[in-house]
Image: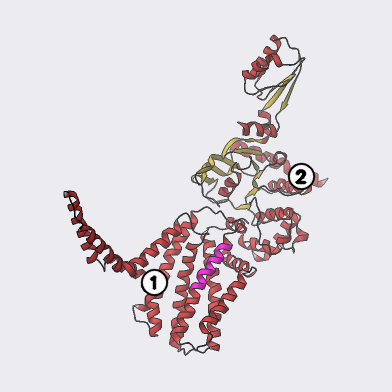
């Protein structure tokens, strides 16, 4: 009970803070007009984004959209051809990075590797053991601390990847495909861990192919396609801003199908229903008047919010 | 920063010694000893120069080896933790340098014990600056030669420039002579037009200029770049250094510093596309 009370208190506190941040436009990093070419072909085109403080920004996009390139630029591993990454303060935030494909020195044990990373992060020798224990416990790897990295499964490697990124108390975590290769239980655990990290005050940028995953943890999304940011919004606003309407009629719509479809690109005509992908009231009224004047009976009008899946499909198709 | 460099050096040496590369390194040292010191009792100059050569070649290959380890995707999480990429570059150079220096000293001790060259205290005191300076320079050159540091055409430019300087320093006179003769022959070909005759006169002038500038300032500059090596070799053979020659190791360290700064500049501006197996 106490835990629940504490959690709800923390959540409210955090949520209020986030609302304020959104209003005040507080960010950790600002990505301004980043361009990147590989051997003449553009990987990123004029990418502009803000990484909001103490939130989770999910970067979505098909394969080859430029997500990993963008993450590597944020982590300082690639150099942008044009544009820049600007921190909110003079001092760069400490960054924890989990690459998409994890490679480890296979002969090292998990503990030895974490110790190396702890040394590199400047953690004092006296605190290292405790910090490593806590982080391995946090990602569920405490029992495997003595195991050689070469013997770890893909799922274990993902967890170690997250744990090493957390060493040194980074302000910003850049997680490229954090749940790739994990079973559903493992995915759930890592997503819970990511949610908890925001409670600790971390800012997270993550990429994923899985829209349900993004929906469940992210506060803000950006969709990259062919190197361009084609959509960015708060997740709740994204869903609310794009309501859909489905108008059901009494008989097949074949006679006026072409007329309806030519009316607007966001109108999809099915056998006995019309789907309006854009939710503007004016469009809805016009379609209704066409249907009524053509003698169709309106059986039902269903109005619902777009899912992230629908938004993603729409914007990546354009 | 020093702490991070120290841990990176340890990590790189650990990576080498937990791979087959360690076997190669130890075998190569054994083979070098067998080839260089198996029968004879070496004289001091032979001892200094041959073990110096081992150090130079060894440092070059060790730094290349460390660079290839650093160039693997395992290094991404390490890079993110650095304040500057130069820290990793320094660690790579130091790891290769220290590894070879250890082997070089081991080899020297074994040779001193088994082959007992006649070395005076003066000879021994001359050794450290010679070996260290040459090793350092070859280590920095190895950085430039590695995929880890090279960016675009950087190594082509650098090693092309060095090759040109070697050519200018050693073969400029004969090449200038050869070119001068060819131009002169060409200029005496029968010509019909006024323009062709003027062109022939210009060719003759160029040929005269080439034959007159055999010891040009360019050649002197080119030679001065490689002068420290000549000075070290002649000083070692003589068993004492002239006052001018004694500066040679310091000049090598200066060259190494300049080349390291260039490497750092190249490395800072490149994309880190590390090797993913």
View extreme (right): residue: A1
* Callout 2 secondary element: helix
The relative height of residue A139 versus residue B220 in the rendered view (above or below) is: above
| Residue pointed to by mark 1 | B251
Q: Is residue B66 magenta?
A: yes
Residue span colored magenta = B57-69
Give the chain of mark 1: B
Q: Main secondary structure of the magenta part?
A: helix
The relative height of residue A206 versus residue B4 in the rendered view (above or below) is: above
Q: Position of residue A302 (x, y in %)?
A: 75, 22
Q: Is residue A101 magenta?
A: no
Q: Quadrant of the N terminus of chain B?
A: bottom right
Q: Are marks 2 and 1 in contact (CB under 8 Å)?
A: no
Residue at point 58% right, 43% down?
A: A66
Residue at point 41% right, 69% down?
A: B254
Q: Position of residue A83 (x, y in %)?
A: 49, 43
The relative height of residue B199 versus residue B223 in the rendered view (above or below) is: above
* Closer to us: A202 or A161: A161
View extreme (left): residue: B194
């Amino acid at each position: 009970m106490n835990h629940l009370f504490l959690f709800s208190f923390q959540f409210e506190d955090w949520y209020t803070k986030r609302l304020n941040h959104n209003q005040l436009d507080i960010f950790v990093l600002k990505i301004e007009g980043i361009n990147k070419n590989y051997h003449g072909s553009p990987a990123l085109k004029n990418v502009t984004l803000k990484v909001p403080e103490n939130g989770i920004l999910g970067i979505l996009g098909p394969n080859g959209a430029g997500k990993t390139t963008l993450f590597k630029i944020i982590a300082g591993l690639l150099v942008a051809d044009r544009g820049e990454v600007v921190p909110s303060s003079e001092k760069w935030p400490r960054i924890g990075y989990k690459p998409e494909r994890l490679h480890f020195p296979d002969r090292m044990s998990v503990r030895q590797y974490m110790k190396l990373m702890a040394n590199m992060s400047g953690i004092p020798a006296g605190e290292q053991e405790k910090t490593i224990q806590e982080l391995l416990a946090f990602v569920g790897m405490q029992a495997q601390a003595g195991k050689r990295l070469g013997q770890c499964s893909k799922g274990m490697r993902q967890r170690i990847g997250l744990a090493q990124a957390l060493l040194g108390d980074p302000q910003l975590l850049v997680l490229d495909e954090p749940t790739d290769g994990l079973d559903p239980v493992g995915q759930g655990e890592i997503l819970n861990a990511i949610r908890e990290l925001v409670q600790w005050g971390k800012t997270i940028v993550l990429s994923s192919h899985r829209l349900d995953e993004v929906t469940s943890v992210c506060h803000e999304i950006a969709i990259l396609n062919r190197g361009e940011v084609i959509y960015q919004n708060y997740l709740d606003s994204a869903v609310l801003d794009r309501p859909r309407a489905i108008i059901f009629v009494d008989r097949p719509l074949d006679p006026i199908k072409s007329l309806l479809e030519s009316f607007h690109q966001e109108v999809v005509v099915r056998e006995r229903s019309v789907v309006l992908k854009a939710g503007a009231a004016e469009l809805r009224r016009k379609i209704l008047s066409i249907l009524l004047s053509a003698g169709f009976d309106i059986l039902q009008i269903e109005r619902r919010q777009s899912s992230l899946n629908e938004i993603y499909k729409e914007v990546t198709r354009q | 920063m020093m702490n991070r460099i120290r841990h990176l050096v340890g990590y790189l040496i650990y990576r080498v010694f937990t791979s087959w590369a360690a076997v190669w390194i130890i075998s190569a040292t054994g083979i070098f000893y067998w080839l260089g010191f198996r029968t004879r009792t070496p004289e001091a100059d032979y001892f200094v120069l041959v073990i110096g050569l081992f150090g130079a070649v060894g440092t070059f290959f060790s730094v290349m080896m460390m660079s290839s380890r650093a160039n693997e995707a395992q290094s991404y999480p390490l890079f993110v933790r650095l304040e500057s990429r130069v820290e990793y570059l320094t660690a790579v150079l130091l790891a290769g340098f220290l590894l070879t220096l250890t082997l070089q000293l081991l080899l020297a001790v074994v040779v001193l014990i088994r082959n007992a060259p006649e070395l005076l205290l003066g000879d021994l005191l001359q050794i450290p600056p010679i070996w260290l300076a040459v090793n350092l320079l070859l280590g920095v050159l190895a950085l430039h030669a590695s995929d880890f540091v090279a960016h675009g055409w950087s190594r082509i430019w650098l090693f092309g420039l060095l090759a040109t300087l070697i050519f200018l320093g050693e073969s400029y006179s004969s090449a200038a002579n050869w070119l001068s003769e060819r131009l002169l022959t060409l200029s005496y070909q029968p010509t019909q037009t006024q323009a062709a005759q003027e062109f022939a006169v210009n060719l003759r002038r160029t040929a005269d200029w080439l034959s007159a500038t055999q010891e040009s300032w360019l050649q002197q500059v080119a030679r001065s770049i490689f002068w420290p090596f000549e000075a070290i070799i002649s000083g070692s053979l003589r068993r004492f250094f002239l006052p001018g020659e004694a500066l040679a190791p310091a000049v090598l360290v200066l060259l190494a510093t300049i080349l390291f700064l260039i490497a750092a500049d190249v490395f800072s501006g490149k994309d880190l596309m590390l090797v993913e197996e």
